[in-house]
Every structure is written in C-alpha cells, then in structure tokens.
Image (cartoon, rainbow, N blue to C red):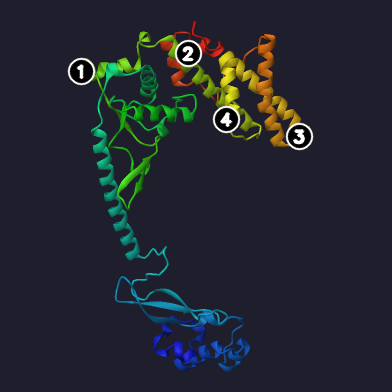
Amino acid sequence: MFEDIISKERLIFKSMHFALDKLSQDEIYNLMKNYYEGMKIKELLEKYRLDLKITNIVPYFPVYLTDIECPYCQGYMTAVFVSRTNEEILKIKNCNVCSHTLDKNCRCENCREMENRQKERLYILKNNMLKELIMDESKKEVIEENDLNMRQRLYLASVLHCRLTEDIKKLKPIDEIIDFIGPSFNFTIDIFKYLYNTKVISIDEQSPLEAFTFDLDDEIITSFSVDKVKYRLNITPYDDDYGLMIKRLLYPDESLFNNEFCYELWKEINLAESIQYFKHHMNKVKFNTEIGEKTRRTFERIVEYFSLSEIFYIIHKSIANGTKLYQSGEYSKTHAINIVKREISNYSERVLANNWSLTGYNRDYNLPESTLSKILFNNIMKIDYLGFRNAPTKQL
C-alpha cells in the first residue's frame, strides 16, 4: 500500500532530519514503509541502528513532492508525513518554488499581491458606487432658507454649533464630536435622520467608505452609518449670502418659534434626559435594564408635571430604595429592578396627589446639558436654568 502512494523519487531527502544521515535513500524509504505498515518504533530503531530516544519518528522523515500544481507558478506543492494513526499519511505544506500554501490565510508574496489587487479593485468599485450616490444626492431639491420649519431651525442650530467645519462649508461626523448635540446619543442620531430625511442636509463626497454598507452583487449602497458620514448643507440663503445664512442658522431669531413648539420640545428633551439619567444610574448599581414601552410611558407622564431637577430626585430615591431591597437578600436583582420602575411611578403619583414639594437634584457632571437644550432655553426661550428647575409650561 505504501508503495502505491509514495514514490521514492519524489522524496526530498535534503529536507530530512540529520539523525537519518547515515542511512541510504533506500533504507530511509524502507524505514518509512515499515513504519506505515505497523512496525513498532522500538523495532524500527533497532533494525536501522538508530540511537534515538523518541516515541515518534515521523518528524524525521523527508518532505514529499506531490503532483499538485501551484496555482501561481510552475512549482508543485510539497507535503509532510503525519502519524500512521491518521487516515491520510500526507499533509500538504507549501509550493517548492514560491512557498504558497493552500491555506486561505496564506501570506506568501503571490497571495499578498493578489490580496492587494483585490482590495484595489474593491476600492475602485466602492468609490464608483459612492460617486453614484453623491450624484443622486446632488440632484436633491435645494431647501429655501425661508421654508425651514421650527424643528429644522432648532436642530440645525445645535448641529452647526457642534459640527460645522472652520471653513463653514461642511459638517463633521458625529463620532468626531465630544459635545452632546442632543440629550442622548439616540436623540442625536434622530436629529440627523430628521435633517437628512427632510433634505436639509446631504451626504458629502468626502465621507469615508467605512460609513457605507455595499451590496457588491447589485453594485448599490444599501445603507450608511448616520454617525460616520460627513454632511453638507442643502439650503440656499434668501439673500444669496452664504456666510450670513450660517450666522442666522447658528443663532436663530426667537421670533421664529412659537410657545407650542417650545413647550413640546421642552418635554421631548426632558424625556430623553430622564431616561438617560435613569439608565446611567441604574448601570452604576449594576441594575442593567432595557427601557420598554411601559417604562417609557411612565417617564412620558412625569415630564408633564415635574421639572428635570425633580425627576432626577425621584429617580435617585427610587434606585436607592431598590438597591437596599436587593442588598437585603430578600429580593432577586430582577425583582429589585422592577420595584425601582414601579417606585418611580408610584412615588410621583403620591407627590401629585398630596401636592408635596420636592427638593430637586443638580445635573450629573457625567451627563452635561446638551447643545440643543442650551439653545432652546438660552437663545430662544431665554429662561436659562429655569428650563431645568421648572416643569414644562407654555407660560414662560
């Protein structure tokens, strides 16, 4: 059987271990044949007069030249011998000329060159797809400055304050910004989605390829990461002065906003900040939890009646109580988490029913005021810290 598989002429004797140097090529071939036919190692060492203290003689065997052609050059793949306990006695190693292996992670010179060519082709393909997307973006209907609604104006002001480049021509990606644009990351993402979907901003041609998801088969871009792309404004100034338009957008006139809009956005900001504060402080005590619809409804109710400062107090008090119950050992963590959520609802209802006065908390320095909040309360409503200390109202 061994002779049917292995030809002596294909053995590369110069590759074998020096411990077999005293044997002739025929003896080495017969040694290998005897091994794979089942002769014990001890008997092999005695028969071929090998003074070796080993239990495995296979690593001493020469490399074998197979008839498998290398896909890159005129060479052939070499193989090493493996233990007779395996089904196959040979394991493919590499090409005898260029050292290519059949492994998908081969790092031979030819494979690296092939990989670089594939990356270059892929890069060109993705760039062409991006150019088509940018071309489509350039065909968007340009928004007239005077047609901007209140939400677009306020969102734009917060975005421009945090992301406008020094040449006032483009917007930097969200993930390059340290400041809080919106009261939470998800709120910030929603701001950009809104501005993009209402055609106020467009994707810029200098956006990185990593920001996009490509369908290489259909050669289309299927989606993009809102926080990684660069944007440009898709707005035309009413006076044809781009610089003055940027100034107007950065500092919008308060007369452009009505009480109803400010009141509704005030509640939206407080809702987002309340949930952000709740999640942050629950995580601090290792009460990791998701915000479901029921919990969200609770927060939607309390922002109607309490200031953000008071909500922070309610949240802190409820978490403190839940933590004590969990530490007592009488409640599981899941039960304690549910108690915290229920306590926020129950305690806030008792405060309303009894008309209790609450001493509010200050902001957590880990959760600073967002740019959106500052612009609403300082530039537009001009109530400054009252936006934090007072419950939302249309009368301010």
The quarter of the picture where residue 106 lies is: bottom left
Which mark, residue 54? Answer: none
Q: Earlier in the sequence, mark 4 or mark 3?
A: 4
Residue 300, given in percent of the width and then of the height, sits at 56, 21
Distance between the alpha carbons at the discs numbered 1 and 3: 66 Å
Category of crowding for the residue at label 4, using alpha-carbon neighbours closer than 10 angstroms: few (below 14), some (14–19), many (at least 20):
few
Query: Looking at the image, do the residues carrying marks 2 and 3 touch, with CB atoms under 8 Å apart?
Result: no
Secondary element at image label 1: loop
Pointer 3: what residue? 331
Residue 240 circle label:
1
Mark 2 and mark 3 lie on one chain; the one further toward the N terminus is 2
Q: Residue at the spot x=65%, y=19% of the render? A: 314
Who comes first in sequence, dot 1 or dot 3?
A: 1
Q: Which residue is mark 2?
A: 263
95 or 331, which lies in front?
Answer: 331
Judging by the rendered image, the residue that carries numbered circle 4 is 293
Please tell me which of labels 2 and 4 falls first in the chain.
2
C-alpha separation, residue under disc 1 versus residue under disc 2: 33 Å
Q: Is residue 273 left or right of residue 338?
A: left
The type of residue carrying mark 2 is: Tyr
Instruction: Give how far across and how far down residue 248 sits, in percent.
Output: 31, 15
